[in-house]
């Protein structure tokens, strides 16, 4: 009898485990929330927060009126005229056993050229099953999903084991003034958090199937370098062997021929291992054992030749700006180049600068850091309940698609919040095809209506898995 009872309990808990929290809301409520998601998506996309100038205060006020109507406490910080952040809380109260989860979204968008769009960038028109608007991919739709999650937690009276915090920031696309201000002026509102979810990551759709779910757990960091050469100026008709342009070109010749060391980070190792089954032949062999691959000539060559892989394994160096004389017949006294360097997590910029000085060493050539402020690249752990929750929920929504951690070559606000000791991931609850993904910062930015009506559910289930009291 007891054995049957235990078996019955095990069975029911296994069945329960397959049902996601959102399933338990029932069809009618889910339809209502999906309707709300589309309404709010269109309202939010119509607010012009092109940065510059930003004007995020309009977006912050829009979020605030929703939070006020729903009885969710929130606060707007207008730290400069027109520039604002907003924070809102759904609290666990005395049931809190875990530290908070932050849902972070930047409210500004990049500028757009309306002449190149099918429909004005702030019209939020629906054409062919997609909502068009600047920010549809980057990242107003995620902001809407995060808003929905807050409203659902509140309306459903979910018993939470941790506070869930909504944070909308200004100025991510230009200078991160919003997050900088928040961290400098209100660290007490953020510092205690355990987790943060924001943009980054990629849930790649190919036709009806999801290819893979990439979760950004680490980002590289830009470290721009200025290389200058000085020499005797003169007339182009009387060549000077040690002129500034000649010295510069000799130095740059060494720089572009130089191969930085291949390194393997835990995130890269996990990424390749998860993707190995999708690869074939030589590539599959290299993917299966990345630690050995970096010491194997053929694998190292394959990595170096593939721009989508190369950046994960090394500090990269791209020569981007060059300047010499203004006139063909004038030998200038100075010539310079700017170099876009991207450092892996854990790298020391001063060490890399010293290395580059050694590599390019030429008389009269100087190598200096171009930036005043450097944000050290960092990474979050992969073995967390939040990562597992994203895996579980993805398996439900996205079938057999591998869920893989990624190192992003670009920069996101995650870097700033990791410095507070928070585990930060970039996760996209919406799928996008390569064509839709390419509208990020491009023309005709859009998202499918069906994704708007589902993405919030995916995020809700992830949040519930790590935040709902058991
Ligand atoms: Zn963005």
Image (spheres, rainbow, N blue to C red):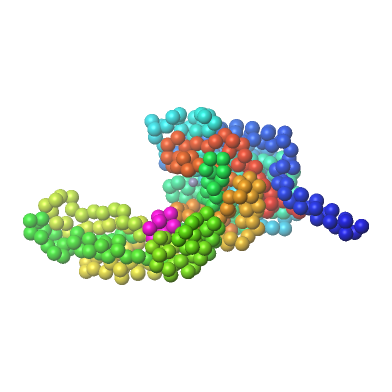
Q: Is residue 8 left or right of residue 327?
A: right
Which range of residues does the magenta coloring cover? 304-310
Check the image and report above or below for 187 versus 106.
below
At a point 58% along the width and 45% down the height, the residue shown is 429
Residue 308 magenta: yes
Overall secondary structure of the magenta section: helix
Q: Position of residue 215 (x, y in %)?
A: 55, 53
Q: In which quarter of the image is the C terminus?
A: bottom right
Residue 63: x percent and y percent?
59, 39
Q: Decide which of 248, 310 is in the foreground and name it.
A: 310
Kindly identify the residue that appears in the image at 61 percent across and 44 percent down. 146
Drawn side of residue 282 relative to residue 22, left or right: left
Q: Which of 218 and 398 is in front in this view?
A: 398
Q: Residue at x 22, y 58 (%)?
A: 335
Relative to 378, is 330 on the left or the right? left
Residue with the most extreme left position: 237
Residue 249 spot, x, y in % from top left: 22, 61
Q: Tell me, yes or no, whether the highlighted magenta stretch contains residue 334.
A: no
Name the foreground residue: 53 vs 390: 390
- Image quadrant where one finds the N terminus: bottom right
Asked if 337 appears above or below 59 in the picture, the reply is: below
Horizontal and vertical percent position of residue 239? 10, 60
* Total numbered labels: 0
């Amino acid at each position: 009898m007891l054995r049957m009872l235990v078996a019955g309990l095990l069975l029911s808990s296994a069945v329960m485990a397959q049902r996601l929290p959102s399933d338990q809301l029932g069809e009618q409520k889910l339809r209502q929330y999906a309707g709300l998601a589309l309404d709010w998506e269109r309202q939010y996309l119509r607010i012009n927060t092109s940065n510059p100038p930003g004007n995020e205060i309009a977006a912050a006020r829009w979020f605030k009126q929703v939070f006020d109507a729903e009885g969710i406490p929130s606060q707007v910080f207008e730290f400069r005229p027109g520039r604002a952040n907003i924070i809102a809380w759904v609290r666990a109260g005395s049931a809190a056993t875990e530290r908070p989860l932050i849902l972070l979204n930047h409210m500004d968008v990049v500028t757009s050229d309306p002449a190149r769009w099918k429909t004005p960038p702030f019209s939020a028109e629906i054409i062919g099953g997609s909502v068009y608007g600047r920010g549809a991919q980057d990242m107003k739709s995620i902001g809407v999903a995060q808003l929905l999650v807050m409203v659902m937690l509140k309306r459903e009276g979910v018993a939470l084991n941790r506070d869930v915090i909504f944070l909308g920031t200004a100025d991510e696309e230009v200078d991160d003034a919003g997050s900088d201000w928040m961290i400098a002026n209100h660290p007490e509102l953020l510092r205690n958090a355990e987790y943060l979810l924001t943009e980054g990551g990629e849930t790649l759709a190919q036709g009806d199937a999801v290819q893979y779910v990439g979760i950004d757990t680490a980002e590289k960091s830009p470290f721009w370098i200025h290389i200058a050469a000085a020499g005797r100026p003169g007339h182009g008709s009387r060549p000077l062997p040690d002129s500034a342009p000649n010295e510069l070109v000799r130095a740059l010749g060494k720089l572009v021929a130089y191969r930085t060391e291949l390194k393997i980070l835990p995130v890269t190792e996990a990424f390749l291992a998860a993707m190995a089954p999708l690869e074939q032949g030589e590539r599959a062999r290299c993917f299966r054992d990345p630690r050995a691959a970096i010491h194997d000539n053929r694998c190292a060559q394959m990595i170096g030749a593939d721009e989508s892989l190369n950046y994960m394994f090394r500090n990269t160096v791209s020569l981007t700006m060059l300047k010499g004389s203004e006139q063909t017949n004038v030998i200038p006294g100075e010539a310079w180049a700017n170099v876009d360097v991207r450092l892996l997590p854990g790298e020391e910029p001063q060490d890399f600068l010293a290395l580059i000085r050694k590599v390019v060493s030429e008389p009269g050539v100087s190598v200096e850091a171009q930036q005043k402020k450097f944000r050290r690249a960092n990474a979050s752990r992969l073995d967390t309940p939040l990562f597992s929750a994203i895996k579980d929920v993805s398996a439900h929504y996205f079938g057999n698609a591998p869920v893989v951690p990624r190192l992003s070559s670009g920069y996101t606000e995650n870097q700033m919040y990791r410095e507070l000791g928070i585990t930060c991931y970039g996760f996209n609850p919406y799928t996008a095809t390569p064509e839709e993904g390419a509208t990020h910062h491009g023309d005709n930015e859009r998202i499918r209506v069906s994704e708007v009506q589902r993405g919030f559910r995916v995020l809700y289930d992830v949040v519930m898995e790590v935040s709902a009291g058991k």
